[in-house]
Amino acid sequence: MFCAFCGKKVSSTSIYCKYCGGKIGENTAIKYRISISNLFRPRIMQILVIILVLIAIASGVTLAYSKKHEQYGDKEYKNNKYTSALEEYLTAKKFWLPERIHKSFKNSDLESKINKAQVMIRSDNHYELGMDAYHNKNYSEALQQLSLLASNDARIQEVQATIQDIKIIMQPTPTAKPSPAIYIKRIKIGPTAASVPQENMEEIEKLQAKVEEIDQNIKRQELYAKIYNDCINERKSHLSNFNITEDQRVAIMANYSKECTTKAEAEVYK
């Protein structure tokens, strides 16, 4: 048998332990607890090892699941399906276990993808609102919405061409009113012309020259707008006969816009 106090082996006929002096047969509860502890200590270690292994497996599974959804999101983003991509990225973030342990363990690459998807969703919204306003001839609203398009949006060239068209359309067209120069001429040749002092006549002549210059500039602007619009409409009509992609159409219209601008400038300011 063993001593309940020091655990050393003693004779069954001993009354006291020769090692520690404890009375043999007393404190059996202590002896029982020691034996129970010795019995379950290896099993406790085994259970802890099993728990750690299960945690490691669960972590690996969740990280793999997170990476899988991130890859799905990349595929959707590449296909311009930004809302679906954002949903996949957010699911991937949900299963990114290190961030749940501590916020400092964020997946910075995944966070960047989430931000980009959100930017492109807003850009999509601005594009749809802008083009709807453009087709409904609400040009000021269309200009405001299309100007907010993301710089990395694939439709940026198309939108820039549309914005240029809107600016031309929104150019104010002067109403047909008599030129102020007519009134100045009436002052010069009217019945009161003789009573106008010479210095005042010189000022009137300068003002007349300035008004005539303004008239010429207005006529140039009107002619420029007409030549440009006629040129663009002719190119659009010609382009409608061909079966081409939207990207090709945008690129061709951008070149047409430059050609029509050059043509209008050449004819107006020659």
Image: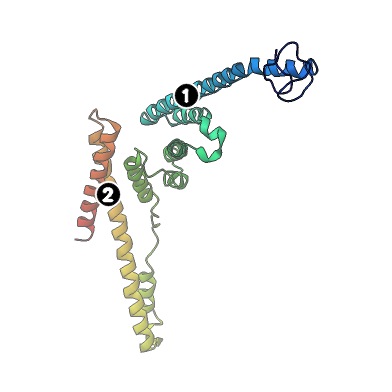
Any mark on residue 228, and which? Answer: 2
Relative image position of residue 19 (x, y in whole percent): 70, 24
Relative image position of residue 24 (x, y in whole percent): 77, 17
Relative image position of residue 223 (x, y in whole percent): 28, 55
Q: CA distance from mark 2 to mark 1?
A: 64 Å
The quarter of the image holding the N terminus is: top right
Quickly name the residue at label 1.
Answer: 60
Q: Amino acid at mark 2?
A: Tyr
Q: Secondary structure at mark 2?
A: helix
Residue situated in front as seen by the camera: 149 or 236? 149
Q: Decide if residue 62 is in sight here.
A: yes
Quadrant position of residue 85:
top left
Task: Using the image, determine if residue 126 lies above or below residue 169.
Answer: above
Residue drawn at point x = 31 percent, y = 55 percent: 222
Report the residue that reaches farthest toward the top. Answer: 12
Q: Decide if residue 189 is in sight here.
A: no
Taking the image as shown, residue 88 lies to the left or right of residue 180, namely right
The quarter of the image holding the C terminus is: bottom left
Taking the image as shown, residue 237 lies to the left or right of residue 77, namely left
Quadrant position of residue 102:
top right
Q: Residues within 10 Å of mark 1 (few under 14, many from 20)?
A: few
